C-alpha cells in the first residue's frame, strides 16, 4: 500500500513574495504552502501527498471550499491536489504534528496513512464497461503504481552513474495480460476480469491476437501496460480507438522484470507496442529540477503529457520512479 501520509521534517522555510500570511515549507523533494510562522526548519509535521483522500474530520474543514468531493467511487472527503498559491506551487498538505494526538510518539518517516484513515483518490478510469470482475488480482501479479520521485529522493543518488532509460507516461488505465501455465488472463489494476470480447481490459488480447501469440511464445509471462483511447481518462492522446502500451514485462518463473532491451524484443515478437522511449544513456546524472523540466511537454495531440518514468536499464525495478508534469497537474479539475 502506498504511503500517502507520513511524518516528515521541514528541510527549509522560504518566504513567498507579497504574502503576509503564507510561506513555503520544503519537505523531502516537495514544496508545500503553509501558514506563516506555523513551522520552522527541523520541525516534524504530517505530510499528505497529492491524491490523498482525507475523511470528513473537523481538522480538515478548512479544505471544504476547495477540496471537498463526494462520489460513488471514493465516498465523502477531501482530495489533496497540486495547487498554486500566490504564485507558489504547492504539492501536498503539511500540518503540525500537535494537531494529531493519536500520532504521539511517531518518528520521521513513519507511515501513518491507515491511522488517519486516508485513502488514495481515484478518478473513474473508464466511461464504458471495463468488464465483469471475477476476483481479486491473482497473487504474485503486481499492480503498477510508480513512486513519485519527490517522495524518494534517495533513488536519484542510487541511479547516479548507471545505465538508464526514460519513457513517456501515457494517459490511460493500467491493463495486465498474463500467460501462466497455459492460462491467459487479464486484470485491471486490482481485479481479475472475465474473458469477454467487449471488456475493456481484454481489449489488448483481442486487438493484438495475444491468445495465439502467447501460446506460441510458450513462456510464463506477465505484461503490464497502459490502455489508452476513447472514454479512458481524458484521452489526451486523442486516439480514435483503444491502444495498449506495455511498460513492464515480468518473467513469471524467475520472478524478475526483464531488462529494457529484452522487453523490447519480447514486445516486438508479440507485435504489441512499448511505451515511447524519450531517452536512454549509460550514465544517469539528472537533478530533481532537471527531471521536473524534462517531464513537461506535450503528446502528439498537443495536450500536456502526464510526465515521464525513469528506470535502471539492466534491472528496471531496482530503481524506478515517475516524474509528473506540473503543468498537467495544475490543470486537473476532477
Image (spheres, rainbow, N blue to C red):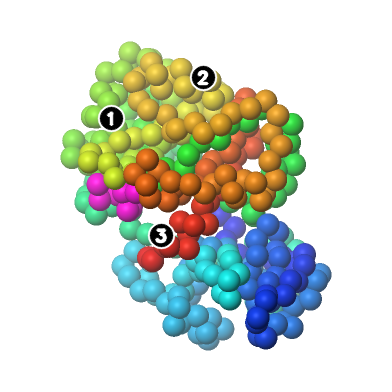
Q: Decide if residue 194 is in sight here.
A: no
Which residue corresponds to mark 3? 122
The residue lying toward the viewer, choosing from 264 and 317, is 264
Say if mark 3 contacts mark 1, CB within 8 Å. no
Q: Residue at x 65, y 82 (%)?
A: 19
* N-term mark: 3 or 1: 3
The residue lying toward the viewer, choosing from 180 and 266, is 266
Which residue corresponds to mark 1? 205
The residue lying toward the viewer, choosing from 300 and 311, is 300
Provide residue 95's location: percent of width, then percent of height: 65, 76
Q: Residue at x 72, y 75 (%)?
A: 15
Provide residue 29's location: percent of width, then percent of height: 68, 57
Q: Residue at x 67, y 25 (%)?
A: 282
Q: Residues within 10 Å of mark 3 (few under 14, many from 20)?
A: few
Q: Residue at x 68, y 41 (%)?
A: 286
Which residue corresponds to mark 2? 262
Q: Residues within 10 Å of mark 1 (few under 14, many from 20)?
A: many
- Residue 218, by quadrant, is top left
Range of the magenta residues? 230-236
Mark 3 element type: loop
The chief SS type of the magenta part is: loop
User: Nearer the observer, disc 1 or disc 2?
Assistant: 2
- Residue 158, by quadrant, is top right
The residue lying toward the viewer, choosing from 246 and 165, is 165
1 lies left or right of 194: right
Specify whether residue 287 is painted magenta. Answer: no
Say if mark 1 contacts mark 2, CB within 8 Å. no
121 lies left or right of 285: left
Mark 1 element type: helix
* N-term mark: 3 or 2: 3
Provide residue 243's location: percent of width, then percent of height: 30, 36
Amino acid at each position: 500500500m502506498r504511503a500517502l501520509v507520513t511524518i516528515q521534517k521541514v528541510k527549509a522555510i522560504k518566504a513567498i513574495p507579497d504574502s503576509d500570511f503564507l510561506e513555503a515549507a520544503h519537505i523531502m523533494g516537495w514544496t508545500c504552502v503553509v501558514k506563516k510562522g506555523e513551522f520552522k526548519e527541523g520541525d516534524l509535521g504530517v505530510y499528505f501527498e497529492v491524491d490523498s483522500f482525507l475523511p470528513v474530520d473537523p481538522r480538515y474543514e478548512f479544505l471544504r471550499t476547495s477540496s471537498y468531493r463526494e462520489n460513488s467511487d471514493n465516498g465523502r472527503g477531501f482530495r489533496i491536489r497540486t495547487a498554486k498559491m500566490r504564485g507558489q506551487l504547492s504539492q501536498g498538505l503539511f500540518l503540525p504534528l500537535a494537531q494529531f494526538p493519536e500520532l504521539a510518539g511517531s518518528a520521521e518517516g513513519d507511515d501513518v496513512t491507515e491511522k488517519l484513515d486516508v485513502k488514495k483518490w481515484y478518478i473513474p478510469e473508464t466511461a464504458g464497461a471495463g468488464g465483469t470482475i471475477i476476483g481479486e488480482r491473482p497473487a504474485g501479479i503486481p499492480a503498477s503504481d510508480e513512486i513519485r520521485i519527490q517522495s524518494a529522493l534517495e533513488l536519484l543518488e542510487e541511479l547516479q552513474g548507471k545505465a538508464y532509460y526514460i519513457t513517456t507516461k501515457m494517459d490511460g488505465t493500467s491493463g495486465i495480460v498474463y500467460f501462466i501455465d497455459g492460462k491467459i488472463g487479464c486484470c485491471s489494476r486490482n481485479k481479475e476480469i472475465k474473458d469477454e470480447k467487449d471488456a475493456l481490459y481484454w481489449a489488448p488480447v483481442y486487438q493484438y491476437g495475444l491468445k495465439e501469440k502467447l501460446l506460441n511464445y510458450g513462456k510464463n509471462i506477465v505484461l503490464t501496460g497502459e490502455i489508452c483511447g476513447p472514454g479512458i481518462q481524458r484521452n489526451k492522446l486523442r486516439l480514435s480507438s483503444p491502444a495498449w502500451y506495455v511498460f513492464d514485462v515480468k518473467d513469471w518463473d524467475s520472478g524478475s522484470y526483464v531488462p529494457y532491451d529484452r522487453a523490447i524484443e519480447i514486445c516486438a515478437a508479440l507485435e504489441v507496442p512499448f511505451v515511447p522511449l524519450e531517452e536512454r544513456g549509460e550514465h544517469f546524472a539528472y537533478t530533481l529540477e532537471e527531471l521536473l523540466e524534462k517531464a513537461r511537454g506535450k503528446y502528439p495531440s498537443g495536450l500536456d503529457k502526464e510526465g515521464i518514468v525513469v528506470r535502471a536499464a539492466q534491472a528496471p525495478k531496482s530503481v524506478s520512479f515517475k516524474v509528473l508534469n506540473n503543468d498537467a497537474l495544475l490543470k486537473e479539475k476532477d
